[in-house]
Image (cartoon, rainbow, N blue to C red):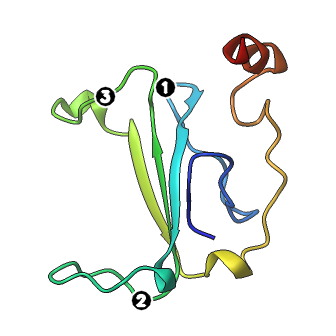
């Protein structure tokens, strides 16, 4: 299932991406079979794309030291066929206290 935010449906063999010792924030995942073909955009017609970004330091990418602050990766498996792990809140870089304080 394509989605924005939430928890990614990462395959079990792919760890959550980390940059400068901190987990990158999950932005989106797309099942490429669900997307319409775009003129001039050479995307595979099957598989999945995952997008991550350091939304804390918000690197722009203009400086070479920003390399790694954003990540897009492709897996040939469709999202529906990926055997995922149960990403815990702490594995995603948050504690229960973080979530409680953000909700208030």
Circle 1 residue: 20
Q: Quadrant of residue 41?
A: bottom left
Q: Are marks 3 and 2 in contact (CB under 8 Å)?
A: no
Q: Circle 2 sits on which residue?
A: 45
Picture quarter with the C terminus: top right
Q: Residue at label 3?
A: 59
Residue 7 coordinates in the image, percent (x, y): 69, 48
Disc 2 crowd, CA 10 A, few/some/many (<14, 14-19, 20+): some
Does label 1 or label 2 sit earlier along the sequence? Answer: 1
Which badge, 1 or 3, is on the more N-terminal residue?
A: 1
* Residue 88 rendering spot, x and y as whole percentages: 83, 40
Q: Horizontally, is 13 left or right of 48 in the view?
A: right
Q: At 84% across and 52% down in the image, what residue appears?
A: 86
Circle 1 crowding by C-alpha within 10 Å: few under 14, some 14–19, many from 20: few
Q: Secondary structure at mark 3?
A: loop
Q: Tag 1, which secondary structure? A: loop
In the shown orientation, is residue 81 left or right of residue 22?
right
Image location (x, y in percent) of residue 52: 48, 46
Residue 104's place in the image compared with 49, above or below, is above
Work out which quarter of the rendered image holds the N terminus and state it.
bottom right
Nearer to us of marks 1 and 2 is 2
Sort mark 3 into few (<14), some (14-19) or many (20+) by Cα contacts within 10 Å.
Answer: some
- Residue shown at 17% from the left, 84% from the top: 39
- Could you say where residue 35 lies in the image, as x and y percent from the top left? 42, 79
Relative to 68, say whether 21 is above or below: above
Does label 3 or label 2 sit earlier along the sequence?
A: 2
Marks 1/2: CA distance? 33 Å
Tell me the quarter of the picture where residue 37 sits.
Answer: bottom left
Q: Are marks 1 and 3 in contact (CB under 8 Å)?
A: no
Q: Nearer the viewer, residue 50 or 1?
A: 1
Q: Nearer the viewer, mark 3 or mark 2?
A: 2
């Amino acid at each position: 299932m394509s989605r924005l935010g939430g928890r990614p449906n990462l395959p079990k063999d792919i760890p959550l991406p980390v940059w400068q010792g901190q987990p990158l924030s999950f932005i989106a995942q797309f099942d490429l079979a669900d997307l319409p073909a775009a003129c001039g955009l050479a995307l595979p017609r099957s598989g999945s794309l995952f997008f991550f970004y350091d939304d804390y330091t918000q690197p722009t990418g203009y400086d070479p030291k920003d390399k790694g602050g954003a990540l897009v990766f492709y897996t040939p498996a469709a999202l529906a066929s990926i055997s995922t792990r149960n990403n815990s809140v702490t594995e995603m870089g948050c504690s229960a206290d973080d979530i409680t304080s953000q909700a208030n």
